[in-house]
Amino acid sequence: MRPAPTAPSEGTMALLSPCSVVQLLATVVAVLPLHLVPAARQEEACYFPGKWEGTWFQSGVRSPIIISQNRLSTKGRCTASEGDKFVVFDEKSCYRCVVIHEKHANVLQYKESYCRSRESLVNLCSLITGDALLYSMFRIEATAVPCPFKGPFTFTYNRGHGDCRSPVSSIDSCTEDSRLLLRYQACPDIPGTESTVEELQCLATWKEGSSRYLVGKVRHSHATSNEDRYRCFVYERSALAAAGGGGSGAGGDDGVDFRVAQSGDATCNGLFSPMEGSRTMTLRKAMSHSKCWFPAWLTSSLRWHTLDYARSYTFHHRNTTLRISNSSLAGGHKPAPSYANTLLSGAGISVSMGLSSDAASQEMRVVCTELKQQTGDVAHLVTHFTMGCQSGFMCMTFYRRDGHVIEVQTGSHTWRQEDACLPANFNKSTLPFVTLVTSSPEPRQCPYLGKFSVTGLSRAGRAARSLRHGRGRPRRDLDGLATDACPEESQDFTTLVVGCSTVDTMEFRSKCLPADVVSAYSCHGRWEDNGTHYLITTPLSRSSHGARRLCFMYRELEGLVLFSSSADSCQRGVSPGVGGALAFNVTSSGQCVEANSCVRPGARALWAVAAVATLAAWRHVER
């Protein structure tokens, strides 16, 4: 351990003359390293901008580059700075000047001097020549930005062996405006061309002089590392397109909207003009897929939901665009698996289209392309869909069941518009229906007003009395009526009262429960399809895990009405009274006046008194 310094004794100091003291101090100052004090001050003040902190990729550097406070992981520690100039010092006692320019929050470019012994910042930075290599760093966990051009486009491309013009290649926008899908076509007479699909995620854009730059991540079958994925682009918009006159067949620059050049590696080196690059492209605006409007009765409500609220259907942009999304995308929670949900994740659209399994979690954008047939309550049309970066055509039929209830059938995905509604891709008799309602559907009169006895109750195909429910507060929906208060054999409802309190209300009651414990449902739209009736209802008192809406499917048979229910859609494959989440039969046991004998007789007596009084008055007038 280094001994602690001791102060000179008074006797020692007394032996030194004032001149000796001055000479001693001068000697001490002379032998101290002159750079210690100013260097410490400089190092304390030298930090890289906080917005640069993070993990970066640089071509040719195997490990990610980390910028944190005063350290640049591959270069060392910052010892001095002035503006965009930084002196860094590494473990090999190497000093160098690094001049860093921020092109975008996700892109840093720099030049550097050679390794030297310690020199001033000015001297080190003066060693960087104009032709020094320019290095680019791309932020690894970058937030994507909107792409500077939005599809659809057609384009030709050149990889140094001539323009690939026929067949023409295409660009489509993805659901997110930060992604584009490029479909390259192979030209038989042009070497180096191939048929492939690439997805471009835009990460940064900036302007430098008269040139505009784009950095993106390209995903394709051959991209296995960041060296393959990161690419730099320089582009320009044609003067005619910039003035609003661009597009296919617009004239001028042969209808060109954009010219683009792409780097051949994960740098921006050598990109000075959109006419020169590893690959150059000429983009022309293609015809929009949106060519018709959804019917007014469909867009009268801009937002529709599946019965279980698992998915929402929202209309945008002057009734030409429909967006279908998971409620979990907006609400932050994952809905329970449901029949309607499987249309995009299991046995429906996703599988028939051949889309990837993760597509179900993404929003689908649908535009009206061709109106095939329209009547007062049915619209049959061809649509173009985009889900993530996958797109194509599909046939859809919408049915108006009520002002606040619609249904939709959706066919298989096709690449060609003319194939979408062919029987092989759209079979009306086998396709499932998705039932949609508005957020606040209006009440409607319920069917079969009166009082009914319930028999043959089963849940999901099992007899109701065999079910045991957990203990807790009595519930008031069809999930179970206060089962702990009843013996096992009578734990579910035994009576259905329709329209007796109000004409739009159905009430399920049990014999052993108090009169105030009732499962009440408000009726909305109803319709008939192929002999089966469908009724949309809303629980008036819903448990936290109960259904948001219910579809009752029912059919009359020899004095019985057979009922089944579903909480996600009005399923056509369910046999009323047998299948479904809940199945039961009802028979009439009286009119509404008998359901409340304490009140209604009084009303009848008043009517009789009024009738007698009226008759007496009439006879008096005749006399």
Image (cartoon, rainbow, N blue to C red):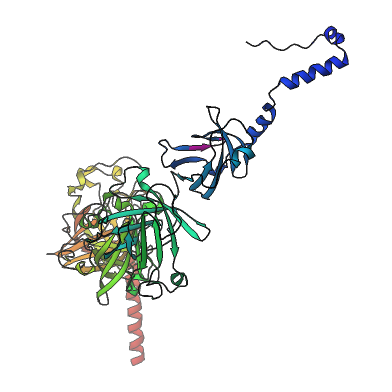
Q: Is residue 520 visible?
A: no
- Is 69 in the magenta? yes
Across and down, in percent, residue 527 comes to 24, 69
In this image, 617 relative to 527: left or right? Answer: right
In the depicted structure, whether residue 181 falls above or below residue 106: below
| Screen quadrant of the C terminus | bottom left
Across and down, in percent, residue 470 comes to 30, 40
Residue 166, quarter of picture? bottom left
| Screen quadrant of the N terminus | top right
Residue 427, quarter of picture? bottom left
Residue lying at the far left of the rendered structure: 558
Across and down, in percent, residue 228 comes to 35, 46
Query: Along the line of sight, which residue is nearer the eye, 68 or 261?
Result: 261
Residue lying at the far top of the rendered structure: 11
Residue 249, quarter of picture? bottom left
Q: Is residue 267 visible?
A: yes
- Is 24 in the magenta? no
Q: Main secondary structure of the magenta part?
A: strand
Residue lying at the far bottom of the rendered structure: 623
Across and down, in percent, residue 375 comes to 25, 77
- Residue depicted at x 30% and y 44%: 485
Q: Magenta stretch?
A: 66-70
Query: Along the line of sight, which residue is nearer the eye, 333 or 382?
Result: 382
